[in-house]
Image (cartoon, grey):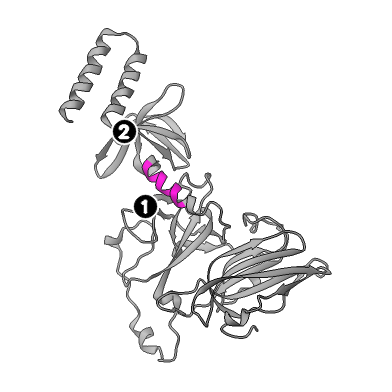
């Protein structure tokens, strides 16, 4: 503590000896905290946690807090390799004590997550996801101890806003507890490598790791946005179309043609009504152009006939493409439009192309852009 802080603290304590009542001392201490720069806030990220009398093992629980509660931070300490904050709750008694750092997120770190969320504030979610295991929500799509926002619980759900293919490192490990020092390094199987033929296409899952940029509900995490390691994510494909997914073409995003709900939140609920869909898929083959991979290479449109209670393919077929996110859906009623960002095979440029879906006698029909042939890599089938 420097001389200025010592002087301020001495003045506060001296004034307290001449004035009675705990209220003044509490207010004076708060003022001191602000002057010395210790004052900030943190938000509880655990479902439940306790403020304790100290950071010792035998400390007593003083007050229970829950996810989303905001606390004032007045001190911090690193005790036996565990970081703790001294906090003040906003309850009637302004309970003050210690809370383990893993249970909260500081205002500074939370602000970084909010800036990420601001980038997608007007964007439509591209898919829903669920965590298979506890994992870290990160500020950027890379495994680093410096970019961790919070740790999310197993079973956490979220909306996927975007994703990124990152070249796979030889020693990449799953992003769970990140105890890398005690984990064996992963190497490619020599027999598999030797069995490959020169004509066999390179596989996406062998070359890249996928990272998802996600948007989270406050009930799941106070941090509204961040990046999640793809190995821990299970895409929640709607139950009425999961049957149409093929092993060589995995669905990566989908939007309803009928209806106006773009949240995708109710797709997995029991009894959810079947819908008509625009679906983007991706094969497992590397298709990089100048080092850049497409987010999707196939488009499937499925209409739902409520009388036959079955899906049908909407014609004409689009076929194979080379495209980048996002998929945008617009319109209501009998005419809907969706926009895809596709690579023009002649110019090599990414261009937005608008498709129109119309309803005629309860059957959907697709109108292609006039120059669609410049964006297809093969005929639809």
Residue under numbered circle 2: 58
Q: Which residue lies furthest to the left in this view?
A: 3
Q: Residue at the spot x=38%, y=45% of the render?
A: 109
Q: Is residue 166 above or below residue 271?
A: below
Q: Is mark 1 on a helix, strand or loop?
A: strand
Q: What element carries label 2?
A: loop
To which quarter of the image does residue 381 belong?
Answer: bottom right
Question: Where does the image place residue 149, in percent across and percent down from the top left?
Answer: 39, 50
Circle 1 packing at 10 Å, graded few (<14), some (14-19), many (20+), is some
Left or right, 55 with respect to 47, comes to left
Q: Earlier in the sequence, mark 1 or mark 2?
A: 2
Circle 2 packing at 10 Å, graded few (<14), some (14-19), many (20+), is few
| Magenta range | 108-116
- Which numbered marker is on residue 148? 1
Q: How far apart are marks 1 and 2 (CA)?
A: 29 Å
Which residue is nearer to you in this view: 14 or 114?
A: 114
Q: Which residue lies furthest to the bottom in this view?
A: 198
């Amino acid at each position: 503590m420097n001389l200025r802080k010592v002087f301020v603290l001495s003045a506060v304590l001296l004034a307290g000896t001449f004035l009675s009542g705990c209220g003044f001392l509490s207010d004076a201490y708060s003022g001191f905290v602000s002057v010395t720069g210790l004052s900030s806030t943190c938000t509880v990220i655990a479902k439940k946690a306790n403020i304790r009398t100290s950071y010792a093992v035998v400390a007593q629980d003083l007050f229970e807090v829950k996810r989303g509660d905001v606390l004032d931070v007045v001190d911090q300490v690193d005790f036996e390799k565990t970081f703790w904050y001294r906090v003040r709750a906003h309850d009637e008694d302004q309970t003050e004590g210690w809370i383990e750092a893993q249970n909260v997120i500081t205002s500074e770190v939370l602000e970084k997550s909010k800036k990420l969320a601001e980038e997608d504030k007007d964007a439509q979610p591209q898919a829903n996801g669920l965590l298979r295991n506890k994992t870290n929500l990160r500020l950027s799509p890379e495994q680093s101890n410096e970019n961790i926002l919070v740790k999310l619980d197993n079973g956490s759900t979220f909306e996927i806003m975007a994703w990124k293919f990152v070249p796979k490192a030889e020693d990449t490990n799953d992003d769970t507890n990140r105890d890398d020092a005690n984990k064996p390094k992963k190497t490619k199987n020599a027999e598999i490598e030797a069995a490959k033929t020169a004509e066999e296409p390179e596989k996406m899952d062998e070359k890249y790791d996928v990272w998802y940029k996600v948007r989270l509900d406050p009930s799941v995490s106070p941090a509204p946005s961040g990046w999640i390691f793809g190995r821990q994510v299970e895409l929640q494909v709607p139950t009425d179309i999961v049957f149409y997914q093929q092993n060589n073409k995995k669905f990566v995003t989908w939007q309803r043609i009928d209806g106006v709900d773009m949240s995708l939140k109710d797709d997995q609920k029991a009894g959810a009504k079947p819908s008509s869909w625009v679906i983007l898929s991706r094969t497992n083959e590397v298709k990089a152009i100048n080092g850049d991979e497409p987010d999707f290479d196939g488009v499937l449109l499925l209409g739902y006939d409520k009388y036959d209670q079955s899906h049908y393919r909407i014609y004409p077929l689009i076929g194979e493409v080379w495209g980048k996110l996002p998929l945008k859906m617009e319109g209501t009623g009998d005419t809907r439009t969706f926009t895809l960002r596709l690579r023009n095979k002649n110019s090599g440029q990414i261009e937005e192309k608008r498709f129109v879906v119309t309803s005629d006698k309860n059957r959907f029909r697709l109108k292609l852009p006039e120059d669609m042939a410049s964006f297809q890599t093969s005929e639809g089938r």
